[in-house]
Image (spheres, rainbow, N blue to C red):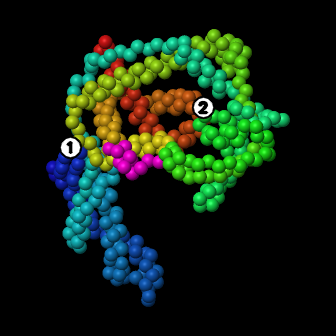
Amino acid sequence: MQAKAEKISAKVTSLSPSKREMEIEVAPDEVAREWEKVLTSYVSRARLDGFRRGKAPRDLVGRLFYKDIRNDVIESLVPRALGETLTTEKIDPVLTPVVSEVSFRDGEPFRFKARVEVLPEFKLPPYKNIRVKKREVKVGDAEVDQALEELHQKSAEYLPVEGREVIVGDYVLLEWKGKDVKTKRVLPTEKVLVLAGHPDNDKALNENLLGLKPQETRHFVISYPQDHPQRKLAGRTLEYDIKLISIKEKKVPEINDEWAKDLGEFENLSSLRERIRKDLERAKVNAARREMGDEIVATIAQGLALELPESLVEREAGAIAKSWTSAESDTVTLEKFEGLRQKARVQAQKNITNSLVLRKIAAEEGLEVTAEEIEEEIKVMARRNNVPLAQLVGSIDQEGKREDLKVSLLLRKAIDFLLEKALLY
């Protein structure tokens, strides 16, 4: 198609559902105006022999600084012409356009091409009255007991111990020195906190910790197997010197009415258990709604064959792969990373498609997110994470996350709409 403006014209070609190419042309008189503007700036700043600053002839400055002026004119015209074309053609690029084939000749129009990736247009299949199996939500006494015990353990205090040696279950602060037996390389001295007797500790460490008193030292050697989960230790023999700095023992309060009252808002242990049960039920209800929502969106999306912008898929896949590899306990090999990345691409395509479906449904149904809803969500996040509200607001604004939060709430509204219109069985 051909779009024309007084100064800028553009021919836009649809290369595919997600790619557009623009051939943009800036009229010669507009190029000349920009040239004169940039030339004037150079004249005002030029220092040439025989001329006072700002008094050198324009044609002389133009000849001497031709390449610099030309580059400045191009750098000024490209974003302006590109921005006007995108606005006129109502093109919303996924990422920054790629500019090519720049043509700048005196007295002629300034021409260049630009390619952009865009989100594909598509028609939604029927999305109301989709059948989805209802999830039953039940909370058993054992789940309440487990949550109560986790809360109980969080109430523990770690009290300094004096006058005795280390026993199983003590938290001990150590000064830790190590040396590689083969290379004689000395490892950096560290202060570490260790739970004495923990089954994840090396056997030699636990044996040397028990019975140790403050300021006492122990020396021992550990030969690590080749298949040790920590690659930096695998196959190495290290000798260690540890010095006990301090001992702390864990003290947990008794589970009773008084303990429940100390947590606040609870009259007794029974009311605390009831709150825990309600919180667990609420969490399960939310999880069930998410599962049903995901199932509905997957049903809608399975009938679509969208060509997604490759750059968007790559960016999303990279973020997913990075989150997966950061969760790995050992070093991720290049081969394993490539395997994860391929799986991440599949997940990225699914995520992007689902997001597009939900956004389009939100637009079709006129769903919106108000500023008040965003503020309320931030308050909920602050309470949930026990973070001061002002601190969280500052962090969100500083990182530019408010728009992301708005999109997240919009997608949530779209899922709620689909659940309201779904047929549960």
**Contact (CB < 8 A) between labels 2 and 1?**
no
Placement of 193 over or under 2, stated as above or below? above
Is 194 positioned to the left or the right of 29 in the image?
right
Between 385 and 340, the one nearer to me in the picture: 340
Q: CA distance from mark 2 to mark 1?
A: 45 Å
Range covered by the magenta-colored residues: 331-342
Q: Main secondary structure of the magenta part?
A: helix
Residue ID for mark 2? 386
Report x, y in % for residue 205: 66, 42
Placement of 204 over or under 69, stated as above or below? above
Q: Toward which corner of the image does residue 257 lie, by quadrant? A: top right
Q: Is residue 337 magenta?
A: yes
Task: Give SS at disc 1.
Answer: loop
Report x, y in % for residue 119: 27, 42
Q: Earlier in the sequence, mark 2 or mark 1?
A: 1
Is 30 positioned to the left or the right of 249 in the image?
left
Report x, y in % for residue 52: 46, 83
The residue shown at (53%, 17%) is 143
Is 48 positioned to the left or the right of 161 in the image?
left
Q: Is residue 203 visible?
A: yes
Residue ID for mark 1? 17
The residue shown at (40%, 76%) is 43
Between 260 and 95, the one nearer to me in the picture: 260
Report x, y in % for residue 277: 55, 15
Q: Quadrant of the C terminus?
A: top left
Q: Which mark is residue 273?
A: none
Categorize mark 2 by other alpha carbons within 10 Å: few (<14), some (14-19), many (20+). few
The residue shown at (47%, 38%) is 402
